[in-house]
């Protein structure tokens, strides 16, 4: 593929299928392009001599275009793109629908399109796209009713209709864009490509998007991590809920990956995920225009106590906190404010405050080193001029270079002030909670941009032995493995209790005698999943009972299921659960993001609460460490309630070793270590279950 | 007190302190009243002959007013109110500040005011109030810059500034009010009084409010329960977070009750609690104008797939669900929609849908018995007229009498349609999530209005024995009790394991021998809180070791703290925790709501997760039952993961018996039963701790 920047700054655009037919897509695109595009527009249509007064060409080959917009019927669209490719056009937007979204014929057509694009190295948007826009060159290559105004956000959307709605609204709100892309079916170019392009684009300050799915989660994470060092990404990824995922699947045919994978993957990618349209734009607007705060401590300056309390609640709900002022600031407030005011945060400058008192208080607050950002919160009063307050706010924000959020409450009287604030990149809200969320997004992005991503640790492991164990399922119908695969963990350096699987009672006794103390004995059979339910597990068996226990376990299994394959009996060292914390470490494969690691506390009480956390593998040490911190029950691992702390480092290492294992072997479809017992002295994987796809070995 | 309705519909209002002085409160109130009040306004001011052309009286006594608005300085305000009372004025609004909010002089003055109001049976608003409004009689008895427009919400606020901000905004939004009250210091009339009044008021359809505290939580619950059978109450109660509570306390001097108590109390009262200004009005607007849905199943009709998915997510986040259509509906959609549409919910009528297709689809959906409400969700297109869509939506909403939410996306082009929708009580939002929240509030209120509140069960208990045990702290410095108070639980019919406290080793053995199996022995001393830490608990002691164990426990205690008061040793039956679930039942007293009951699962794992729920006592059986259902770990009690279900009925009864105990004895300041062990065979309170205030016995 070429440079995507060419896609957004062509000099000559060919519209293949251009027409003047009223209500047609070809007409709408021609009109939109002719309206403001800085370069040349060339209609291509063998049935017309000219379109909108411009001579029409018969063939894209003669157009010398650097971008082709294709609006011909689906049956000839692939041929047109091939001709464009042959003619050396490297950028194509396929507006035409009737591809992957419409059944098997369409899917075959889309496959052809992809092959053509690959053969000719074409950067192809769509098919089934509303088109693209780029305001610096005045390009509106869409068939939508509105053009974007100039701005520094770039916007991609998997819904074309959403673009039309957003533009209609954004134009009234004074929100502008640099580029806009309707992703369509994402046959060639997808979200990762645009994130990468806009990350390199000096004219894009914020990347926003509406996505229903991410095609290649791993590639997206890699790209977005790099981009978000500088450029914030805010996305609505819909299909968050079960109902939503089902709706997304019927809308764009998106395969429903688990939202846990999206949640983890987007977090690891450094993306700020918005849950609604309002959140998307509230975050994007401040990220576009406001500086990042040095600290998370907010000063609230208000002429109204009640709304001051509301904003304090909103700050309490967020990652931010209320600033504690320096002595100098408190002294200044004491001097400047009337007795009934409040010099502590939220600073109540009282209802009779005029513009001067407001301005001075804000100046003092923003000048305090303990203050990272401020909220200017005002109710309408007879002595306060909102426009002057807006001008002062803008000036002081610029002077102190700290982010400021505005909450001038009221109706029409606020509008001129709000417009002045918006011009300076300070959005104004009636609701203090929304103002706070903007500051919260800035703080969030500051942390994201400062992240240091480490490569995953590579441990010295016995890969060959692991492969051998996994290969044991080859030729079998049932490709699940249980305790008989404990050696897999061993091969990857994950501690397991001493023990062996034996197939004779005398051998069981041999093993038991080599193990200190009583043992645990479990039937090993791929056909018996819930061993405990049939009495297939015996805990605390003394050596003298091992022989009989073996026979009892086997006969129970036989009684339960006469044709069960019985591999043998596992004789295992007892692990003392009293001193330990039972945890679970697991993995399943997500269709978009690949191996998704799970960590949580185990035992029936905690499992019921589903207190778990997820990461896309491979994970680095800090990511694995974070997993052990972010579950609710994390304090238990670290010795809450007077217990000795468990070997958290051992848990962290186990997560990383599992991460390496599942990354090395795509053949492992899912795997659970449950429990992984963490004691003060170390960790031990007591049981394992996995499913293997032998074709991927 | 008289009827509060008089306060809002006076015929003759005296303004004591009326003046024409520019910028004064007395001037502002006179002007506001003269602007539109339907009755007479009488200025009272001995320094003036007339005010705004109306002859001024020297004395309130001569005014024959049925409402007095007092704006005189604080020093004479109480005298004025007394004179009003003597003159038979039963309704007084005290605007004057300088009372309880300003230190001890002010507090004394407020106390005088309360006494005067009580003596003369005055319904008194304030002091420190912005005033009151009532639109049916055109009364604006505030000194704010805006008057309310006519509507069917009544609004109370503990922040006067917030009222001015809301009115300024609401007037632009077309949101009107019936009554508005600035509560001020709530010396006499408080939130419960207005809730009661508006509950009886046919002209009020929704009660909304901003509160920083509720003075008498129990009275509020009782009043609000009655009112919310018919009239929804939506409140912002600020000070939700720790930071917010601190800010509220410095703003209005509100004693910070725990937000857990507010959360529980407001829920029990049937109040819909909004977390922000936006939520407050979004909920209030639909509750004012839309019918309640029969079912929670929503139909989404849209011309845009992407926003359809977003609204489905929002429904997934809410208490609502996506409707499944009847066969007849699906057939109708199949016939009416193009092939690329979606006949299942969200119904995608496709981007080329004209008004007729939109109208027909909405008509079919609303006619489906499986559909409780609908969202009309539209992106702007060339073929769709928003004003016609609005008219159709309004008509179909009225025809089917089901709630409808609108989400016509776009900017200025939406405005005329949005205005038409608003006139019919259908708010329009750009963000589908907000539209869904409105429907969610309707569903919530339907459930609230259908609640059947039961009286708490009264169990047959031994109140005298309980009093005796509680009295044991009389004369003691340390008023805490531990296991020595197990008899208290026994007196209230809460099962405890067999056991006794003894003060000699031979007695210990006696007790142990009467108990089946091994016993638990614990040191009993008010000075030793953490018994386990000093080895003060022995579990599983066989009879032959009881004598020695007694001596060992006592000597450990002596070593730990030589001067500790040692009551003796508790010898208790062993409770088998393996079969049981450890729970916690407790109570502490909240300054506003009184006894606040807690229920949660116990054991160190679950306690760390703080999986608990709260109710204000006394609780009825259904409320106690709900507590056992609403914790996250509830399934464990009911036999999750293959366990036998615990005796949930026993837990429910224990919660109710504790509720009765702490209601009977305000002297119990806090009490914890931890653990209350629930097994399949019953429940047993294994340990108890409480603190007693002997002065309240």
Image (tube, coloured by chain):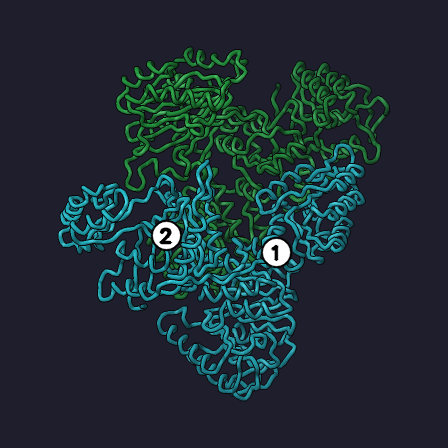
Chain colours: A cyan, B green
Output the chain of dot 2. B
Quadrant in which residue B104 is drawn: top right
The reply, left or right, for residue B101 in relation to residue B395 is right
Question: Which residue is painted at 26% across and 22% down in the image?
Answer: B516
Say if residue A249 shows up in the picture. Answer: no
Output the chain of dot 1. A
Image mark count: 2
The reply, left or right, for residue A174 in relation to residue A584 is right
Q: Where residue B286 sits: x, y (%)?
A: 53, 43
B411 versus B641 height, above or below: below
Specify few, some or many for label 2: CA neighbours under 10 Å numbering under 14, 14-19, or 20 or more: many
Question: Which residue is painted at 64% across and 79% down in the image?
Answer: A39
Task: Using the image as rendered, state which of residue A311 and residue B46 is in the foreground.
Answer: A311
Question: Which residue is painted at 73% across and 20% down in the image?
Answer: B109
Query: What residue is shown with label 1?
Result: A446
Label placed on residue A153: none
Look at the numbered disc 1 and give the secondary structure of its residue.
Answer: helix
The nearer-to-camera label among 2 and 1 is 1
The reply, left or right, for residue B475 in relation to residue A504 is right
Task: Using the image as rendered, state which of residue A341 and residue B12 is in the foreground.
Answer: A341
Quarter of the rendering occupied by the C terminus of chain A: bottom left
Question: Which residue is painted at 56% across and 41% down in the image?
Answer: B275
Q: Are marks 2 and 1 on the same chain?
A: no
A368 versus B130 height, above or below: below
Specify few, some or many for label 1: CA neighbours under 10 Å numbering under 14, 14-19, or 20 or more: many
Q: Where residue A56 sits: x, y (%)?
A: 56, 85
B244 versus A661 height, above or below: above
A598 versus B210 height, above or below: below
Q: Real-space Cα distance between discs 2 and 1?
A: 47 Å
Q: Where residue B4 sits: x, y (%)?
A: 61, 24
Query: What residue is shown with label 2?
Result: B325
Look at the numbered disc 2 and give the secondary structure of its residue.
Answer: loop
């Amino acid at each position: 593929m070429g440079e995507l920047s060419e896609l957004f700054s062509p000099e000559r655009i060919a519209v293949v299928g251009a027409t003047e037919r009223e209500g047609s897509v070809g007409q709408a695109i021609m009109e939109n392009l002719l309206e403001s595009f800085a370069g040349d527009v060339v209609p291509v249509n063998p049935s017309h001599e000219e379109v909108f007064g411009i001579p029409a060409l018969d063939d894209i080959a003669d157009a010398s275009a650097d971008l082709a917009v294709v609006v011909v019927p689906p049956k000839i669209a692939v041929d047109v793109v091939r001709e464009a490719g042959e003619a050396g056009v490297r950028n194509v937007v396929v507006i035409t629908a009737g591809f992957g979204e419409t059944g098997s014929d369409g899917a075959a057509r889309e496959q052809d399109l992809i092959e053509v694009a690959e053969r000719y190295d074409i950067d192809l948007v769509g098919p089934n796209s509303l088109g693209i826009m780029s305001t610096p060159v005045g390009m509106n290559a869409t068939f939508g009713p509105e053009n974007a105004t100039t701005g520094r956000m770039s916007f991609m959307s998997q819904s074309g209709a959403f673009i039309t709605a957003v533009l209609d609204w954004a134009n009234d709100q004074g929100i502008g864009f640099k580029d806009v892309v309707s992703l369509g079916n994402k046959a060639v170019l997808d979200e990762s490509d645009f994130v990468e392009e806009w990350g390199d684009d000096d004219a894009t300050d914020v990347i926003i998007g509406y996505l229903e799915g991410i095609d290649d989660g791993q590639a997206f994470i890699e790209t977005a991590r790099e981009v978000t060092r500088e450029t914030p990404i805010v996305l609505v990824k819909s299909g968050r809920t079960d109902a939503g995922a089902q709706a997304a699947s019927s809308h764009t045919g998106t395969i429903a990956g688990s939202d846990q994978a999206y949640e983890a993957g987007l977090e690891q990618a450094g993306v700020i995920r918005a849950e609604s349209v309002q959140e998307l734009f509230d975050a994007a607007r401040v990220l576009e225009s406001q500086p990042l705060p040095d600290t998370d401590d907010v000063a609230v300056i208000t002429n109204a106590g009640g709304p001051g309390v509301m904003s304090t609640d909103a700050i309490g709900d967020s990652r931010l906190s209320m600033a504690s002022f320096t002595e100098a600031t408190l002294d200044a407030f004491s001097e400047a404010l009337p007795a009934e005011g409040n010099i502590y945060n939220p600073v109540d400058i009282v209802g009779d405050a005029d513009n001067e008192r407001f301005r001075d208080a804000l100046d003092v607050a923003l000048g305090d080193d303990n203050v990272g950002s401020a909220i200017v919160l005002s109710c309408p009063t007879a002595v306060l001029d909102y426009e002057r307050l807006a001008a002062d706010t803008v000036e002081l924000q610029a002077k102190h270079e700290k982010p400021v959020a505005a909450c001038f409450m009221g109706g029409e009287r606020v509008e001129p002030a709000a417009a002045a604030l918006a011009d300076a990149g300070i959005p104004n809200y009636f609701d203090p909670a929304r103002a706070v969320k903007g500051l919260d997004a800035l703080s969030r992005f500051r942390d994201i941009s400062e992240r240091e991503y480490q490569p995953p640790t590579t441990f010295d492991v016995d890969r060959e032995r692991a492969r051998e164990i996994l290969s044991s399922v080859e030729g079998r119908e049932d490709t699940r493995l249980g305790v008989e695969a404990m050696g897999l963990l061993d091969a990857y350096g994950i501690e397991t209790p001493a023990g062996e699987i034996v197939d004779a009672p005398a051998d069981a006794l041999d093993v038991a005698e080599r193990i200190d103390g009583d043992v645990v004995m479990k039937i090993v059979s791929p056909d018996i999943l819930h061993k405990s339910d049939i009495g297939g597990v015996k805990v605390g068996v003394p050596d003298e009972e091992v022989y009989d226990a073996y026979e009892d376990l086997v006969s129970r299994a036989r009684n339960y299921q006469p044709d069960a394959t019985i591999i043998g009996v596992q004789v295992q060292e007892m692990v003392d659960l009293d001193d330990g914390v039972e945890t679970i470490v697991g993995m399943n494969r997500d269709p978009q993001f690949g191996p998704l690691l799970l960590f949580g506390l185990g035992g029936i009480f905690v499992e019921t609460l589903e207190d778990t956390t997820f990461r896309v593998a491979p994970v680095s040490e800090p990511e694995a460490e974070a997993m052990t911190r972010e579950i609710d029950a994390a304090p238990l691992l670290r010795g809450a309630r007077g217990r000795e702390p468990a070997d958290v480092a051992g848990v962290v290492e186990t997560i990383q070793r599992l991460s390496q294992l599942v990354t090395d072997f795509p053949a492992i479809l899912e795997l659970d270590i449950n429990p992984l017992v963490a004691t003060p002295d170390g960790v031990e994987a007591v049981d394992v279950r996995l499913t293997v796809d032998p074709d991927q070995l």
